[in-house]
Image: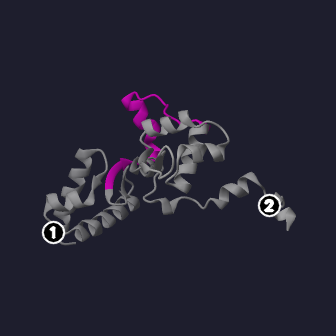
Amino acid sequence: MQNDDINLKSAIEAILFAAGYPVEIAKIATALDVEEATISRLLSEMRSEYDVAERGIQLLILGDSCQLCTKEEHIDKIRAILGVKRGGNLSRSSLEALAIVAYHQPVTKSYIEQIRGIDSSYAVNNLTEKHLVEVCGRLDAPGHPALYRTTDDFLRVFGITSLNELPPVEIFAEAVMPSGSSNSAEAKS
């Protein structure tokens, strides 16, 4: 490995450690006066190095941003040493709403309610407060309802780098309707 790459990786690591939140790759490239492609290559190498090594941290690449995070297997030890109580878990209604947004985004609150069959104001507000979903525009319809999409925090919390890494939605249909069962559409054919 070239000395320049080692120095750049060291600088990237320091930036991400100090930031504590996702940093845009373009900003890192600008700060280090290096091409964005070089930073992307180095980040990819660094992520592999963190994954292979028995390290307590990992490098997440979230689209056009990246962040250093602790590995989930250490969460209980971190909570114990920092005195952080367990909590912040999402309710079933919030998880349902989040899944709808993740798989169908951008969506309106009305769309979420239509699928869930129940008022989802609390769930959507909760997800917005936790920065897992955000307003990304307005629907060109009467009342101009807000459109919601997932955030980079959603990707970080769920340990994925893009929505393409979500499991296929068909997995959930199989969990709800075991093989051997038939739904009404199959029964009619």
The crowd level at tag 1 (other Cα within 10 Å; few <14, some 14-19, many 20+) is few
> What residue range appears in magenta?
66-92
From mark 1 to mark 2, how far is it between C-alphas? 57 Å
- Left or right: residue 88 compared with residue 5: right
Q: Which residue is mark 2?
A: 179
For this rendering, which residue is in front, 173 or 5? 173
- The image quarter in which residue 60 lies: bottom left
Residue at (58, 50) in percent of width and height: 100
Amino acid carrying label 2: it is Ser
Which image quarter holds the C terminus?
A: bottom right
Q: Is residue 180 above or below residue 97?
A: below
Per the rendering, the mark at residue 3 is 1
For this rendering, which residue is in front, 93 or 175? 93
Which image quarter holds the N terminus?
A: bottom left
Residue at (45, 39) in percent of width and height: 128
- The image quarter in which residue 34 lies: bottom left
For this rendering, which residue is in front, 136 or 73? 136
Q: Between tags 1 and 2, which lies in front?
A: 2
- The image quarter in which residue 180 lies: bottom right
Amino acid carrying label 1: it is Asn
Q: Find numbered disc 2 in the image and state the secondary structure of the residue it sits on.
A: loop
- Left or right: residue 25 compared with residue 135: left
Counting from the top left corner in percent of width and height, residue 103 is at 55, 56
Q: Is residue 80 above or below residue 111?
A: above
Q: Are marks 1 and 2 in contact (CB under 8 Å)?
A: no
Counting from the top left corner in percent of width and height, residue 51 is at 40, 60
- Left or right: residue 74 compared with residue 10: right
The crowd level at tag 2 (other Cα within 10 Å; few <14, some 14-19, many 20+) is few
For this rendering, which residue is in front, 147 or 122? 147
- Of label 1 and label 2, which has the lower sequence position? 1
Counting from the top left corner in percent of width and height, residue 110 is at 57, 44
